[in-house]
Image (cartoon, rainbow, N blue to C red):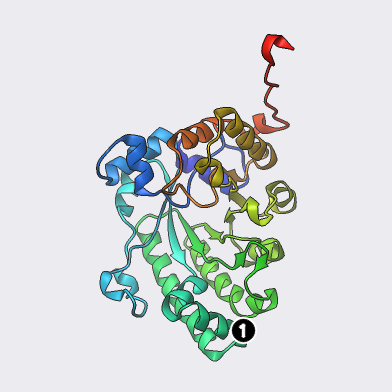
């Protein structure tokens, strides 16, 4: 079974031959360290994906330089690096990333002006959300036409304690626009995942009702208990992530990483509908040996994750 099949089965809440795996983002510095190469292009990224046996590649948009500091660049000028090659030359499930209204609002207006507009529920805010929606609808059409198999809308609506705005405000202004974006992608046969850092517990039902096929991140340090979320929403959302990036940054023994990964898999993988990965992606500063140990521990069939426990470490002298 190849990556496209595994991920498609996970999204459909069916059980693949092993737990599928993928990352929101992969820093070139991580690729260089693992491969020992001086530069990183498509071939090196493909080899990195092969080494980790990834099933997903998620491509971030590249905007033209002339748009820096200005308005939104024309959608026709946005690209996803090597999208056609990932589609034609690999068996990976190819996601493209789109930014949501929070991301664009902070980028275009700055944090303070944007959140003042959110607090006031201003006409200016409504116009921005409408502009981002139209922009993303055009990008979805382009990406689907180029062979993208999934869309990931990234919009950090929460911090560690909860949503960054009152849920009622998000329901009045942001989620209706997301419904239309998800509906258009679904009509093109492209599943859509949502990404946000932080504590989304108060918004999980809204994310489900919006029509998202999956949720990426599930930050444990922000109170996102993947076992609980799996029980409540696992039949309606494909869950992707939940491995704390600190596990790959701080010194950890292979056994410690096995325990962490197997605990995660036992909570989220049985029955399918789960994709293994970190909350953040693989970022500069992570230890290559930790990445390899964590991904090695994730090489399991979903049914084998039920009640999985590592054997006790024997003490010296067998005592």
Residue 133 appears in view: no
**Which residue sits at x=58%, y=55%?**
214
Image quadrant where residue 115 sits = bottom right
Q: What percent of the width, then of the height, locates residue 165?
A: 64, 75
Q: Does 145 appear above or below 7?
A: below
Q: Does 273 appear above or below 288?
A: below
Asked if residue 40 lies left or right of residue 22, the reply is left
Q: Does 314 appear above or below 222?
A: above
**Which residue sits at x=50%, y=63%?**
153
In the displayed image of the protein, which residue is found farthest to the front?
A: 316
Q: What percent of the width, then of the height, locates residue 314?
A: 68, 16
| Label tally | 1
Asked if residue 89 lies left or right of residue 55, the reply is left
Q: Nearer the viewer, residue 36 or 125?
A: 36
Q: What percent of the width, then of the height, locates residue 102?
A: 52, 73
Image quadrant where residue 147 sits = bottom left
Image quadrant where residue 10 sits = top right
In the displayed image of the protein, which residue is found farthest to the bottom?
A: 123
Q: Dividing the image into 4 quarters, which one contains the C terminus?
A: top right
Asked if residue 224 lies left or right of residue 52, the reply is right
- Secondary element at tag 1: helix
Residue 31 appears in view: yes
Which residue in the structure is indicated by mark 1? 119
**Which residue sits at x=30%, y=41%?**
44
């Amino acid at each position: 079974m190849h990556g496209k099949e595994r991920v498609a089965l996970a999204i459909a809440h069916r059980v693949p031959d092993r737990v599928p795996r993928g990352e929101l983002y992969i820093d070139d510095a991580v690729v260089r360290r693992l491969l020992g190469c001086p530069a990183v292009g498509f071939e090196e990224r493909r080899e990195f994906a092969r080494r980790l046996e990834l099933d997903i590649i998620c491509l971030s948009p590249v905007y033209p330089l002339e748009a820096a500091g200005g308005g939104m660049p024309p959608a026709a000028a946005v690209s996803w690096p090597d999208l056609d090659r990932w589609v034609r030359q690999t068996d990976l499930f190819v996601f493209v990333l789109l930014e949501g209204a929070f991301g664009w609002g902070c980028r275009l207006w700055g944090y303070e002006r944007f959140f003042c507009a959110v607090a006031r529920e201003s006409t200016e805010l409504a116009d921005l959300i409408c502009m981002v929606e139209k922009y993303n609808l055009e990008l979805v059409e382009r990406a689907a036409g180029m062979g993208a198999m999934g869309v990931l809308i990234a919009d950090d609506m929460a911090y560690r304690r909860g949503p960054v705005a009152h849920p009622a405000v998000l329901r009045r202004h942001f989620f209706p626009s997301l419904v239309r974006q998800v509906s258009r992608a679904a009509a093109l046969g492209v599943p859509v995942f949502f990404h946000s850092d932080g504590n989304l517990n108060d918004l999980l039902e809204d994310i489900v009702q919006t029509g998202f096929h999956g949720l990426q991140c599930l930050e444990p340090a922000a109170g996102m208990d993947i076992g609980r979320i799996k029980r409540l929403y696992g039949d309606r959302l494909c869950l992707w992530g939940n491995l704390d990036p600190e596990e790959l940054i701080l010194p950890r023994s292979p056994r410690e990483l096995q325990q962490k990964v197997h605990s995660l898999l036992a909570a989220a993988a049985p029955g399918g509908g789960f994709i293994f990965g970190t909350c953040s992606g693989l970022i500069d500063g992570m230890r290559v040996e930790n990445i390899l140990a964590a991904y090695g521990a994730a090489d399991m069939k979903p049914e084998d994750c039920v009640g999985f426990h590592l054997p006790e470490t024997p003490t010296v002298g067998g005592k």
